[in-house]
Amino acid sequence: MPKIVRFHQTGRPEVLQIADEPLVQPKQGEVRLRAQALGLNRAEAMFRAGVYLGTAQLPSRLGYEAAGIVDAVGPGVSGVEVGERVSTIPAFGLARSRSPSRDEATRRRAPNMRLRARRKTGRSASRK
């Protein structure tokens, strides 16, 4: 079962909780990523602390940046295949939108996230 990092109140790192979440199939326009690395940065630390540019919608989660391998593709997705190595980066402010899943095992693509894929030719492709 995938694990997620969630917080129900803003504050110091002690407000973070690790929770199990069921593995779900990607919906229309989403992909699921078996994350191999997550990026947490100053913006997310500020978001967790409640001092970011916007207010967190609680409960909230961390882990907007990730790299890994696509392990499932939802209906209507083209140009990304199961087994492809990809990374995600936020294309929005943390407080304006929530990523549907930010966890150690899976990530679904949100409409406002950019997905970068390394092609077999060695060139990068960016999708939104």
Image (tube, grey):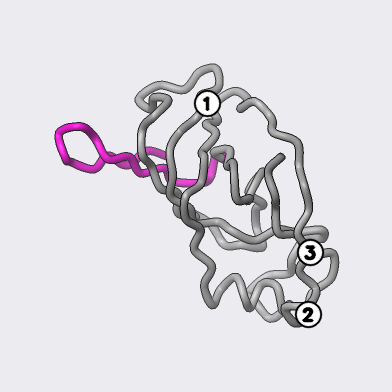
User: Label 3 belongs to which residue?
Assistant: 17
The part of the image, by quadrant, that contains residue 46 is: bottom right
Amino acid type of the residue that numbered disc 3 sits on in the rendered structure:
Gln
The front one of 53 and 83 is 83
Label 1, label 2: how far apart the Cα atoms are: 35 Å
Q: Please provide the residue range marked out in magenta.
A: 110-128
Amino acid type of the residue that numbered disc 2 sits on in the rendered structure:
Gly
User: Label 2 belongs to which residue?
Assistant: 11
- Determine whether 41 is above or below 68 in the image: below
Q: Residue furthest left?
A: 121
Position in image of residue 54 (x %, y %): 68, 70
Position in image of residue 55 (x %, y %): 73, 69
- Determine whether 22 is above or below 98 in the image: above
Element type where label 2 sits in the image: loop
User: Label 1 belongs to which residue?
Assistant: 72
**Quadrant assignment for the N terminus:** top right
Q: Residue furthest top?
A: 75
Labels 1 and 3: the sequence-earlier one: 3
- Determine whether 77 is above or below 88 in the image: above
Q: Residue at x 61, y 62 (%)?
A: 94
The answer to whether the residue labelled 1 contacts the one labelled 2, judged by CB atoms less than 8 Å apart, is no
Labels 1 and 2: the sequence-earlier one: 2
Tell me, yes or no, whether the highlighted magenta stretch contains residue 122.
yes
Residue neighbourhood size for the residue with mark 3, other residues' Cα within 10 Å, grouped as few (<14), some (14–19), many (≥20): few
